[in-house]
Amino acid sequence: MKFHEMTWPLLRQVPRDRVVVVAPIAACEQHSRHLPTFTDTILVTGVAEGVEQRLPEQVLLLPTLWLGASHHHLPFGATLSVEADLHAKLLGELLTPLLDDGYRRVLLLNGHGGNIDTLHVALRCLQPRYRHCHLTGASYWELAEKELAELAEGPRKLMGHACEFETSMVMALRPELVRRDEIRNDGLPDDPALRGLYIAEDMAQRTHRGAVGYPELASAEKGRAFLAAAITRTVEVVQALLKRPLPS
């Protein structure tokens, strides 16, 4: 079910305790010289729609919230962004009317790294008020981390930015938007000694062209495999969430 394609009488009939509200969140920001600014939105929407197609009676899919916390991309320009605290509040405001309307299970499905912290803050702020609900969220690549790593060819097995993963998936979904002549590997290599350490830096400090990873290894075939893995894992999560007893 797609929230934005239904009327209010139809939505009133949705069983509140037997569906998962899937709310895709993303960004509109620079993605190096070879991918469009809407990359994160294109990809998480593709994953979310794939999940809804697999579970049409168990998923209530919201339209993708494309505005993200992307200030770390501003040095390159070509970025629309809000401050992190405002984005966390925005996510809470997005879910509140649905929770007040009786929906008991929600999943913020994230497609942008800059939203990870705001997603967590939003859910933690909502939890005391909605203790009887399952308030959940994750980035699609976190859910499918193991599967994506097994499919990746390059040395970087985690999601980067305009990388092997993202470039491949845009090639699969919107090939006409990929500037293949501009594809270059980019970004500082990961230092094993700094594993687990968070470093506050913007993308211009970390990259030359605005990418992190190995997009030169991308292909549409890989993109279809990456998308299939992300969709399958998210379907598994939704099914498990529906089986999980609701808190009292």
Image (cartoon, grey):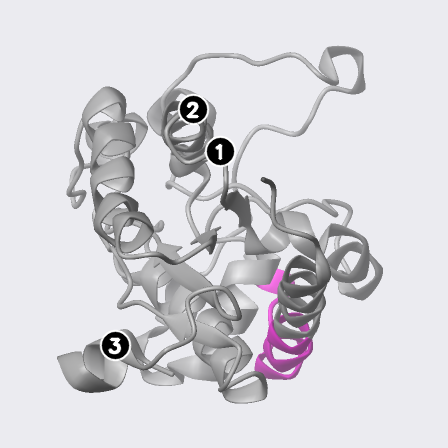
- Mark pair 2, 1: CA separation: 6 Å
Residue type highlighted by circle 3: Arg
The percent coordinates of residue 10 (x first, y second) are 24, 86
Q: Nearer the viewer, residue 218 or 25?
A: 25
Cβ atoms at labels 2 and 1 below 8 Å apart: yes
* Segment colored magenta: 216-228
Q: Answer with left or right where residue 7 lies relative to residue 113.
A: left
- Label 2 crowd bin: few (<14), some (14–19), many (20+), radius 10 Å: few
Give the structural element (helix, strand or loop) at label 3. helix
Q: Which mark is residue 118?
A: none
Corner quadrant of residue 227: bottom right
- Label 3 crowd bin: few (<14), some (14–19), many (20+), radius 10 Å: few
Query: Pointer 2: what residue?
Result: 128
Q: Answer with left or right where residue 129 lies relative to residue 19.
A: left
Residue closest to the far right? 150
Q: Answer with left or right where residue 131 lies relative to residue 125.
A: right
Residue displayed at 49% across by 33% down: 131
The percent coordinates of residue 83 (x first, y second) are 20, 24
Query: Pointer 1: what residue?
Result: 131
Give the structural element (helix, strand or loop) at label 1. loop
Quick check: 180 above or below 154? below
- Mark pair 2, 3: CA separation: 26 Å
Quick check: 94 above or below 22? above
Give the structural element (helix, strand or loop) at label 2. loop
Residue 11: in magenta span: no
